[in-house]
Amino acid sequence: MIIQCENGSVRLASELRDIMEPGFDDWIRITPPPSLGFACDDPDLCNQLKDQIAKFEPDIVAIDPWNRVAADDKGRDYKEAFEKLLAILPTGNRPPALGIVSHTRKPKHDERTSGRGLMNTIAGSYVIASVPRTAFVLQTASDDTEDARVVWTCCKNNDGELGARSAWECQNGLFALVEDFDWEAFDDRGEKKEGRRVLSLELIKEILRGRPQGLTRGEIVHRLVDPHGFSQSAAYNKIKEYADLFTEKDGRFYV
């Protein structure tokens, strides 16, 4: 069940037309967007939702988007909104999962973030990232307005591994896996060049390949500074940014 607080029926019909088949309503329900957003402090609205959720018994209840739920970006408003949402959901042995769609903030100039660092790109109070057990971030694959590809990354998972990021192509309600996605180009976009090469994830992987004993952070930095000519500070910052994407044991990194 999707509690839709923003997109109207025309847009939803356009985006879902390729998956609208007989029996669709038996599996998915989408509410019309309230004119003033999701007023979680309105007892009548909350009681109606609670009744509908109990009748439909969904596995997932999704809120889209979060900024139409919380009154402000302050932590107190976020916590109150979470408490009211959880009060709507049924309890028991198999309560539905709660999914929240939240916007990301506008990136800073030349900012490139990946892995767990993407948690810091979620807009609003820290509460939006700290309360959920799991968080994913969806990024556009490029700045090209005709590029329908996106990158999907798990940046928080309290109950398991983060797993590898993946690339997909949006297709009107469906997503097709992009098998030959150019990760090096994605990681390099917006990077500043120092010396003759780009200080990228692929370059660090190249340095680690063929070294079964791994390398320490300092050894990686040395190989980035000489012969590639990067500064030590730039090398350390880049290793810190990509640290979650490598295996680390006893202070040594492996690919």
Image (cartoon, rainbow, N blue to C red):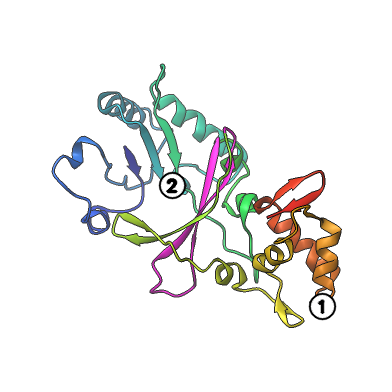
Asked which quadrant contains residue 150, the reply is bottom left
| Mark 2 lies on residue | 68
* Along the viewing direction, whichever of 211 and 73 lies nearer the viewer: 211
Task: From the top left corner, tell me how far across and down residue 109 is, in percent.
Answer: 65, 71
33 up-or-down from 205: above or below: above
Q: Amino acid at mark 1?
A: Gly
Residue furthest to the left:
22
Residue 90 in magenta? no
Q: Amino acid at mark 2?
A: Arg
Task: From the top left corner, tell me how far across and down residue 81 is, in percent.
Answer: 50, 35
Residue 146 in magenta? yes
* Along the viewing direction, whichever of 238 and 80 lies nearer the viewer: 238
User: In the image, 43: left or right of 24?
Assistant: right
Task: Label 2, secondary structure: give it.
Answer: helix
Residue shown at the point (16%, 39%) measured from the top left: 23
Which comes sooner in the sequence, label 2 or label 1? 2
Q: Quadrant of the C terminus?
A: bottom right
Task: Label 1, secondary structure: give it.
Answer: loop
The answer to whether residue 111 is seen in the rendering is no
Q: How busy is the neighbourhood of tag 2: few (under 14 within 10 Å), some, or many (20 plus)?
A: some
Residue numbers of the magenta segment: 132-159
> What's the CA distance linking mark 2 and mark 1?
48 Å
Residue shown at the point (49%, 49%) measured from the top left: 102
Q: How busy is the neighbourhood of tag 1: few (under 14 within 10 Å), some, or many (20 plus)?
A: some
Q: Quadrant of the N terminus?
A: top left
Asked which quadrant contains residue 14, the reply is bottom left
| Mark 1 lies on residue | 229
What count of labels does the image hold?
2
